[in-house]
Structures are given as C-alpha cells and as structure tokens.
Image: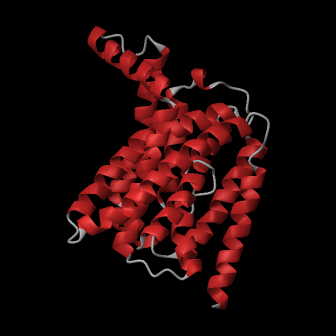
Amino acid sequence: MTTLQAIILGIIQGITEFLPISSSAHLVIIPHLLGWDLPQEEAFIFDVLVQTASLLAVITFFWQELIQMVTAFLRGVFTGKLFEEQPARTAWLLILATMPAGLIGLAIKDLVEAAFSNPMIAALFLLVTAGLLITAELLGSRSKKIATLRWQDALWIGLAQAAAIFPGVSRSGATITGAMLRGYERPSSARFSFLMAIPIMLAAGFSATSDLIHSQNWASLLSVFIPGMLTSAVVSYISIRWLLRYLVHNSLYPFAIYCGLFSLITLLTTILR
C-alpha cells in the first residue's frame, strides 16, 4: 500500500463510516475496482485502524455528552445508584448494546477476515443494507426520543449491530434501522448509533494494533497508515455533523438506492472481467 492509496482510502472511510452505506464494503470494493492488489492481512489491519481513527471523530463530536456519561456512571457506581441519572443509564445501555457484536465478532474473527478479501460478498451484503434502510423507513414509527430508551431496545439495537460484522452490512445503517424499528426518530437513532461505535471501535482498534505490532514490517506499514488515519478522522467528523443535520428532515431512501446501485455495478463489473 502506498501513502496516496492510504489517503484515498482514508477519505472513503471518513465519508462512509457514519453514512449508512458501509465503509467496510467500500474499503473492500474500491481497491478491487481500481485494480489495487493489496495484501489481505495488510488491508484488514489498515481497514480496522482507519475505522479506529473515525473513533477520534466520534469522541471529539460528542465529548461533552461523553464526559457527562462517564461522570454519572462513576458516581452511580460509587453511590450504588447505578441508574438514577439519565447519562449513567445511557452509558449502561451502550454497554449492553455493545455486547452482542463483541461476542460474535470474537467467535468468528477468522471468517470475517476472509470476507474482507472478497468484493463479491461485500457487494451482496450491500443489498442487505439497502433492504434494512428501506425496512426502517417503511416500518419504523419514528416517534420516540433516545432518552426513553429501554434495555430491551438497547439489546435489539445491539443485535442489529452484530449483523454488521461482515463487510457490506453498514454498522450505522443496521443500528439506525434497529432503533427506528423500535419506534425511535431518525436523529436520535443516529446519535445512539454513533455512540455505540465507541466501544466496538476501541475493541477492534486494540486487536488491529496487536496484529500490526506482531507484523514483521510494522514500522514501514505504520508510516503509510498514519496519513490515511488522519484523513479518516477529519472527514469522519464532517460526515457525522452533516448526517445528523440531514436526518432531521430527510429519509434514508437515497442511501438505500446508492447501496443497491453500487452493489449491482460491482457485481456486474466483477462478473464481466
């Protein structure tokens, strides 16, 4: 991987991580369409690291809410009143929502890594993302605020996130869909989805960092990866800000159409080669 390739992929990651169009699919498919022959292990580590860089954007954007949640969470632990404050309650619900994807991800890590080398699988899963977004718009009642979230809702959204382990199934798309199917409005669903990304990205980042350190040429790889990671962080912040504003008055249908078209183009291009 060259530095230019890393920067291009960092931009793609930043745009697609929080928009419900699957960053993992784009990081698999774009190099394939451009004819970049990237080593599978190297590409997988890079993909996870640029996703971790997007984590910096989430933390920066929501830093005030995060401080409130951490403070209330710790206060609740020390006082024994775990769920008395709303921020503490939200923190516990985020932990619960993270568990399904974390457990399933550890169980099938090798299978997921193999899927990251197959653009056809990513393209097919993009159709799943399109279907999820359409389902959310057709069946979601979109009336509840995220402050009313219950543990059953958090667990349901967490199970939706677990479906996004494979490339092509958008994590934000799956979790926003999960929240909307439980009756939550689009912006609130997106905010909870973005906050859910923090623990899962932290876990994935630690795993990828460990893989990078154990790589024989980790120093040279890191010098190439860093520009892509920085680019990803900046563009991710812009994407978060834009999407939250967009969802106030607009639907998910354009993203569903995009996923369907991009999937079909990828499948046709791959088959006709």
Place of residue 155 in the rendered image (x, y in percent of width and height, measured from the top left): 49, 37
The quarter of the rendered structure image containing the N terminus is bottom left
Classify residue 115 as left or right of residue 41.
Answer: right
Give above or below for 139 relative to 50. Answer: above
Relative horizontal placement of residue 267, taking residue 75 as reference (left or right)? right
* Front one among 130 and 139: 130
Give the residue at x 54% y 53%: 14
Which quarter of the figure has residue 112? Answer: bottom left
Q: Position of residue 268 (x, y in %)?
A: 69, 82
Give the answer, above or below, for where 190 lies relative to 127.
Answer: above
Q: Quadrant of residue 251?
A: top right
Residue at horizontal 45 percent and vertical 32 percent from the top: 94
Residue 156 visible in the current orientation: no
Tell which of 227 and 237 is nearer to you: 227
Q: How many numbered marks have been drawn onto this rendered protein structure?
A: 0
Percent x, y for residue 262?
69, 68
Pick the quarter of the image with the C terminus.
Answer: bottom right
- Identify the residue at image location x=47%, y=57%: 165
| 266 vs 16, nearest the viewer | 16
Q: Residue at x 63, y 50 (%)?
A: 19
Q: Position of residue 166 (x, y in %)?
A: 49, 62
Give above or below for 194 relative to 8: above
Q: Is residue 221 left or right of residue 130?
A: left
Any part of residue 34 in sight: yes
